[in-house]
Amino acid sequence: MTDGTPSIRPAPGGPRAGGSRSGGRAPRATLGFVIRRAVHGVLLLDKPIGLSSNDALQKAKRLFRAEKAGHTGTLDPLATGLLPLCFGAATKFSQISLDADKRYQATLKLGVTTTTADAEGAVLARREVDVTRAQMEAACAQFTGPILQVPPMHSALKRDGKPLYEYARAGIDVEREARAVTIHHIVVVAGHDDAWMLDVSCSKGTYIRTLAEDIGKVLGCGAHLSALRRTASGALTLAGAHTLEQLASMSEAERDTGLMPADALVADWPVVRLGAEDAGRFLSGLRRRVSLFDAPYVRVYGPEPKAFLGGGHIIAGELISTRLLSPVEVQGLLSPQEQALGLVTS
């Protein structure tokens, strides 16, 4: 959703030549400036191969002319698939998606190991492959449940303030501590000979590249990850996701319609509704008395029609704020008709 309040930012690369379709490309002021606006909501982006998560975020942010945006966890340039992007008020809840379980479609190339455990690395070794489906399923079963996983050297994890991939590029191998992750399931979707596709559901922090490499070790032939597609993050899936090309072909109004609401990431939390007076006080950080059971997470709204105020928790009959929207953000989520009713006081 948007509240229509503009601001002006320089457009990367300066002014562009060529005309624009009415209602299509973002309006631009003179001298190459983009008129930014307050946009609130969650975009389900189907990230293409070859782009970093931040590159994809910046492209989407420019298309929406959004003042504020952030992603909910990185996907390697090699990977495609679901990348939830948060705009405006929704950015305050991006950590929830970051912490959520993930689901992937992973393609393994058996018989070939690489320096990065994926298709981008140099080949280290090649071996003969003779693997049946039963052997693949048995190998995958060894990694189902809680496991300890050693992060790859080519990762963004830091050691002494420096990313591991910088050590790796310098030819330095540093000791990494194994981390506890959980593989909820690994299903062998299809495969034969040296190419196999797996459906993997796992906890946050799981490296699918390392999983592919470890499965190859168990099979005795080695393996690397040749392709990766994220299909789900928590309750969010690729259903309704848009590619950058699709977004670029839409009018601005069509793009806005494709956004999920700002509270989409907390849609499974219990709901608490407050009257206008309590809503205003809650937004100022004051605790409110409620006749509700204790709850570690709740999403809080003002009176009907709903006005999302933020998240909180309930202890001993007290509603305590955890993450609040500003009054300006709350107003930005409401329609002009709802705003006219003065549902939230600033």
Image (cartoon, rainbow, N blue to C red):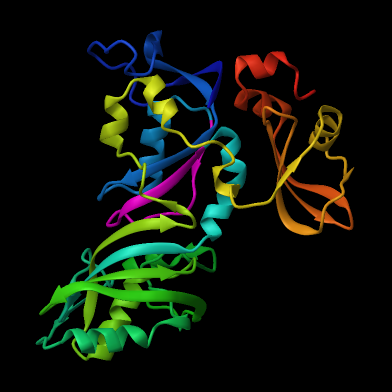
Q: Is residue 164 in view?
A: yes
- The quadrant in which residue 57 appears is top left
Residue depicted at 44% across the width and 26% down the height: 256
* Magenta region, residue range: 68-86
Q: Nearer the viewer, residue 48 or 122?
A: 48
Question: Residue 296, image x and y in percent?
Answer: 74, 59
Q: Nearer the viewer, residue 240 or 62?
A: 240
Residue depicted at 22% across the width and 88% down the height: 134
- The quadrant in which residue 284 appears is top right
- Does 222 sit left or right of 41 as displayed? left
Residue depicted at 38% across the width and 78% down the height: 173
Question: Residue 292, image x and y in percent?
Answer: 83, 52
Q: Is residue 54 above or below residue 116?
A: above
Question: Residue 247, image x and y in percent?
Answer: 32, 31
Query: Of all residues shown, which one is farthest toward the top?
Result: 30
Q: Is residue 168 above or below residue 300?
A: below
Q: Is residue 145 above or below residue 254?
A: below
Question: Residue 93, image x and y in percent?
Answer: 60, 46
Q: Which quadrant would the C terminus be assigned to in this image?
A: top right
Q: Is residue 80 magenta?
A: yes
- The quadrant in which residue 287 appears is top right
- Does 209 sit left or right of 108 as displayed? right
Q: Is residue 219 magenta?
A: no
Q: Is residue 195 in view?
A: no
Q: Is residue 322 above or below residue 315?
A: above
